[in-house]
Amino acid sequence: MNRKSIIPITIILGSLLVSFAIYMNTTSNVKPIKNTSAIRPVSTLDHILGNPNAAVKIIEYSDFNCYYCADFQKTLRRIINDYGPTGNVAWIFRELPLTKTSNNSFKVAQAAECVSSTAGNNAFWKFANIVFSNRPVNQTKLGQYISEAGANPNDVAKCIMNGSINKRILSDKSNALEIGADGTPYTVILSPNSAPVIVSGAYPYSYIKQVIDTAIYASKEK
């Protein structure tokens, strides 16, 4: 084999390897659920963006200090912007602070839940968006973020101090681990007439859209 023929073959082999890696990465993100019955039903106590009665529900377990979670928020916001108006899809946010990898993950989760507790669901989503847009989270700016979200920093501070929302955070985390979460973001997609789908990781809009389209189609089958 002469030198001229080696280069094209090397390029071709490299391309095949990259294609295979992409294929494996895309197809390996859907993982089996360890315990389907453990998935906590969506209720009015959840943080919901979109139609609470939507047929397709995206339940995301997330960490405010997670880089991949911040990236995935953009994907899910785009999904809700596209599908939310139809009433077919709702996004549910649940806490999964990875305290072993981040010292302040639990503290930020406390702030988020207390924003929700004192100022409501809309304030929670505004706070979540602000925090994810400014990660890694600087705790000295949490008061600023709380105010920008429309909540009162003093009320939030009192809520954090009394620990009333700790049970909520730990319940979310426990539920995620029971289902089989092994990192964040960890997402469960529920739809009538089809088994729950797990998406482990921050996958792109095109892939999530495909999963959602399939789920919507399944929900309309008789």
Image (cartoon, helix red, strand yellow):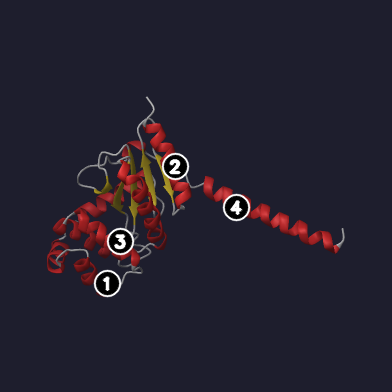
Q: Name the residue under label 3.
A: 129
What amino acid is found at the position of numbered circle 4 in the picture? Answer: Ala
Q: Quick check: marks 1 and 2 in contact, CB under 8 Å?
A: no
Name the element at disc 4: helix
Q: Residue 141 placed where, x, y %?
A: 25, 73
Quadrant where the C terminus is found in the figure: top left
3 vs 4, front mark: 3
What amino acid is found at the position of numbered circle 3 in the picture? Answer: Asn
Distance of label 1 from label 2 (alpha carbons)? 36 Å
Residue 55 in view in this figure: yes
The mark nearer the N terminus, 4 or 2, is 4
Q: In which quarter of the image is residue 216?
A: top left
Q: Identify the residue at image location x=32%, y=46%.
A: 84
Q: Quick check: marks 4 and 2 in contact, CB under 8 Å?
A: no
Rendered view: 14 above or below 134: above
The mark nearer the N terminus, 1 or 2, is 1
4 vs 2, front mark: 2
Distance of label 1 from label 4 (alpha carbons)? 38 Å
Q: Name the residue under label 4.
A: 21
- Which label belongs to residue 156? none
Q: Residues within 10 Å of mark 3 (few under 14, many from 20)?
A: some
The mark nearer the N terminus, 1 or 4, is 4
In the picture, measured across the screen, residue 54 lies left or right of residue 10, that is: left
Name the element at disc 1: helix
What amino acid is found at the position of numbered circle 1 in the picture? Answer: Gln
Name the element at disc 2: helix
The mark nearer the N terminus, 3 or 4, is 4
- Which label belongs to residue 139? 1
Q: Mark 2 points at which residue?
A: 211
